[in-house]
Amino acid sequence: MRLKSHTGDPQAIADYRPLIASNGRTYSLKNARPAPGDAPDLLIAVVDGITTREAAEALNRVQLHVERDRLPPPDEEDEFLLADLIGLSVQTEAGEIIGTVVAVPNYGGGDLLEIAPAQKGPTALLPFTKAFVPVVDVAGKRIVAAPPDDLFEPAKPQPEDEA
């Protein structure tokens, strides 16, 4: 079956056992190799106990996770596990709490922090760079951010160029 790995070394996903689905069922990979193409995080994997096409199709879009305590600590000071960032409080350099990290998406241009505002409203995305996020204090359960003033304001429609 095809599998998208989110580990530093994509094939290392096979070393983490068991992988846990949201329904609590566990899976182990017997083998994982790069899938054809240019995406290094896409693998072809053999899942222990999955022997038919129908069983493999039943796992389509199932997200598999590893228990946090089974993961090694980050190698570098400015390296973080996504699971450690989600749920952290986000505050300004002046100490004002602006929200909570709810996800860390990456749409191809780098990691972003998706922040739910402290006041009700839609989430906002903040680039996860030193310029916008100078301090990440996992032990203190907080992130210090330098967000733009309009972080939680809805995007204004852009006027169309006149030809």
Image (cartoon, rainbow, N blue to C red):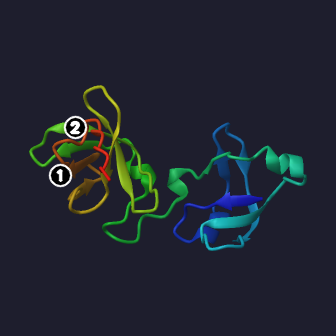
Residue receiving disc 2 = 98
Tell me which amino acid carries mark 1: Ala
Q: Is residue 70 visible?
A: yes
Which residue is farthest left?
94
| Count of number-bearing discs | 2
Residue at disc 2, secondary structure = strand
Left or right: residue 122 compared with residue 91: right
Left or right: residue 134 compared with residue 126: left
Residue 108 higher or lower than 83, as above or below:
below
Which residue is farthest top?
120
- Contact, mark 2 vs mark 1 (Cβ under 8 Å): no
Residue 8 higher or lower than 147, as above or below:
below
Q: Residue at x 35, y 50 (%)?
A: 113
Residue 118 higher or lower than 49, as above or below:
above
Mark 2–mark 1 distance (CA, rounded to whole Å): 11 Å
Tell me which amino acid carries mark 2: Ile
Quadrant that contains the N terminus: bottom right
Q: Nearer the viewer, residue 148 or 76?
A: 148
Residue receiving disc 1 = 146
